[in-house]
Amino acid sequence: MNLFLGIDFGTSGARSVVIDTHGGVQAEGVCNSKESLVTMESPKLWKNGLFELLNQIPKDLCSQIRAIAINGTSATVLLCDEMGNPVTAPMAYNHSCDGAIVERLKAIAPPDHPVLSSTSSLVKLLWWQENLTPPPKGKLYFLHQGDWLGFLLHDKLGISDYHNSLKLGYDVVNLCYQSWLLRAIQWEGKIRPILPQVLTPGTCISPINGELSDRFGFRRDCIIRAGTTDSIAAFIASGASYPGEAVTSLGSTLVLKLLSPRAINVAKYGIYSHRFGDLWLTGGASNTGGALLRHFFSDRQLESLSRQINPNIPCYLDYYPLLQPGDRFPINDPNLLPRLEPRPSNDVEFLHGLLNAIARIESQGYQLLQNLGASPLQRVYTAGGGSQNSTWTTIRQHHLQVPVIPSPHTQAAYGTACLAMGGKLIKKSNC
Ligand code: ADP
């Protein structure tokens, strides 16, 4: 049997999935890291987590694995020396740097570029250039978490993919580093890190390091492929692959992603686009979502109250459910006030109002993406805690007016295993 391994380093621990050529899951593994802060020790923990996941795979399956890919959290970055040893603690995906760097970048980066955020990979790199003391001697490599973990498997330092590298400022249209970016990193910083060579996700990099192949029982010709980010891996897992196909994630927040032939980047709405083969993955995120539902109800209450809602009758409540003021997408207003009044005494009616409002915001989000030039919406896959709520699915279908279906697979590790198998982003079926 030919098998393929996907490894996910997401925000809550690491997971692995081994699939066969039909997309069937043959093995799964998990390594729940307790780490909450990113420290000098983190890369060691990531490495231990990676090796623990490899160790969990039954040996008879290891010997049948033909290719491996890894995804990491987007914009979790590190600096390392020419042996690949980290020289400073990594910066996590949500680490926010000095806004002054963003202001300086605005003068030279293209308008609306995803690097113009205090958490972007490029801003983190520029911060290190200015502030890392004492400046390490010798060559330095700038890598994303997934790049570094991949390096442990294939031994080639300084390789990334165009999903991880979008927030570093890599030009994903022309597949190069543009002169504005090279100029930015020439600022009078004390260090000049080497930028990674950027490959298409899924590109074959090299066979696995021989020592690891012997240690874990992999074939000597098991290929390591270029990886992706955790959220794109989750999108790949859904199987969506045609223009107009979308994935809504109903987790703590509401996240929309829509495949389209055109890239859309509008910073004020937080909309940006990842290259996805010949298509573009456009998307945005609202602050509404499951965290607000959890504020009012337990998951068990959500289930039982939802069963009592008639999703086919109109809802008279006009809410904009937020835990605190402000939203960016689909309404860009940092002072937008939560609208949760009037609250009916009956919880079934109240929840109906909340679910209906979030469904309306989802529909407005897709409408905004289409107004800005994305493909007409054809079909919406759903991931996240809210995807199991069939009442909500019916309400959403009324608003969206297209089929709404649960994603057959939602795990990022599964999507990354698909990437390991196909080496391509767009496929006919799930894998
Ligand atoms: P995240 O990974 O973003 O934290 P999850 O995908 O695990 O989120 O989803 C958790 C969210 O799902 C919670 O905020 C919860 O309110 C919501 N949720 C759980 N069960 C239901 C349900 N039956 N109906 C609607 N929402 C639900």
Image: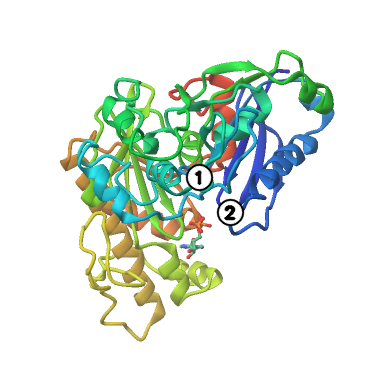
Secondary structure category for the residue under label 1: loop
Which label number is shown at residue 76? 1
Compute the Cα span from label 1 to label 2: 9 Å
* For residue 42, above or below residue 353: above
Can you give x and y, in whole percent of width and height, for residue 407 in the image?
48, 42
- Looking at the image, how many numbered discs can be counted on the residues? 2
Left or right relative to 76: residue 398:
left
Ligand 1 contact, mark 2 (Cβ < 8 Å): no
- Other-residue count near label 1 (Cα within 10 Å), few / some / many at <14 / 14–19 / ≥20: many
Instruction: Please tell me which residue is depicted at 73% across the width and 39% down the height of the picture.
Output: 53
Residue 107, quarter of the rendered image? top left
* For residue 205, above or below residue 322: above
Can you give x and y, in whole percent of width and height, for residue 189 in the image?
39, 40
Question: Is residue 302 something that shows in the picture?
Answer: yes
Secondary structure category for the residue under label 2: loop
Front position in the image: 174 or 277: 174
For badge 2, the amino acid type reads Val
Instruction: Please tell me which residue is depicted at 30% across the width and 43% down the height of the picture.
Output: 402
Is the residue under label 2 in contact with that under label 1 (CB below 8 Å)? Answer: yes
Can you give x and y, in whole percent of width and height, for residue 329 in the image?
26, 54
Question: Is residue 243 something that shows in the picture?
Answer: no
Which label number is shown at residue 38? 2
Front position in the image: 318 or 129: 129
For badge 1, the amino acid type reads Thr
* For residue 39, above or below residue 413: below
Q: Earlier in the sequence, mark 1 or mark 2?
A: 2
Can you give x and y, in whole percent of width and height, for residue 76 in the image?
50, 45
Q: Which color scheme does this rendered protein use?
A: rainbow
Which label number is shown at residue 329? none
